[in-house]
Amino acid sequence: MDSQGGQGGTVAVSICYADAAETWMRELVLPQGATLADAIQASGFRQAYPGVDPARAGTGIHGRRRPLDHVLHDHDRVEIYRPLVFDPKESRRRRAAHKAASAGAKGHGRTR
């Protein structure tokens, strides 16, 4: 084993993406020095999900955002994140409005 943990100048990584319907995952062995972008290219992700742009959606390693030029290490889990469907501010507004409406409805129509 070399200092990076791979054998013969390689790194073993997994790459995953989860959409609403399924989880897509591939195991890869790449040359040492390979980047996150190299893993995405080698995995066939762009062919499987042509409508998803990892550069826009975001990528990471083990739950931490990382850029596409991040150099991979042995046993890294490359994650391609889903694009946000809602604006976070709009989502908070909707939740607050729903909570206020629910609280108002609970107090009506009952007497003790």
Image: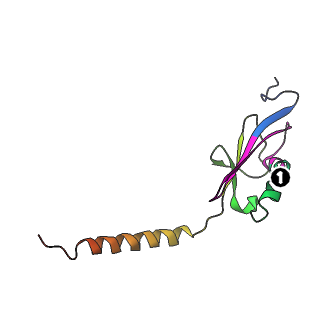
In the picture, measured across the screen, residue 41 lies left or right of residue 52, that is: right
Furthest-front residue in view? 21
Against 19, residue 88 (above or below) is: below
The one nearer the camera, 106 or 58, is: 106
User: Magenta span covers which residues?
Assistant: 14-39
Q: In the rendered picture of this protein, how many numbered marks are placed on residues?
A: 1
> Which of the 4 image quarters holds residue 99?
bottom left
Against 56, residue 64 (above or below) is: above
The colouring scheme, among rainbow, by chain, secondary structure or one colour, is rainbow
Furthest-left residue in view? 112
> Which of the 4 image quarters holds residue 11?
top right
> Which of the 4 image quarters holds residue 62?
top right
Q: Quadrant of the N terminus?
A: top right
Q: Can you identify the residue that label 1 sits on? A: 44
Image spot of residue 16 (x, y percent): 70, 48
Say few, some or many: other residues with alpha carbon within 10 Å of mark 1 (under 14 / 14 to 19 / 20 or more).
Answer: few
In the picture, measured across the screen, residue 14 lies left or right of residue 64, that is: right
Against 30, residue 102 (above or below) is: below
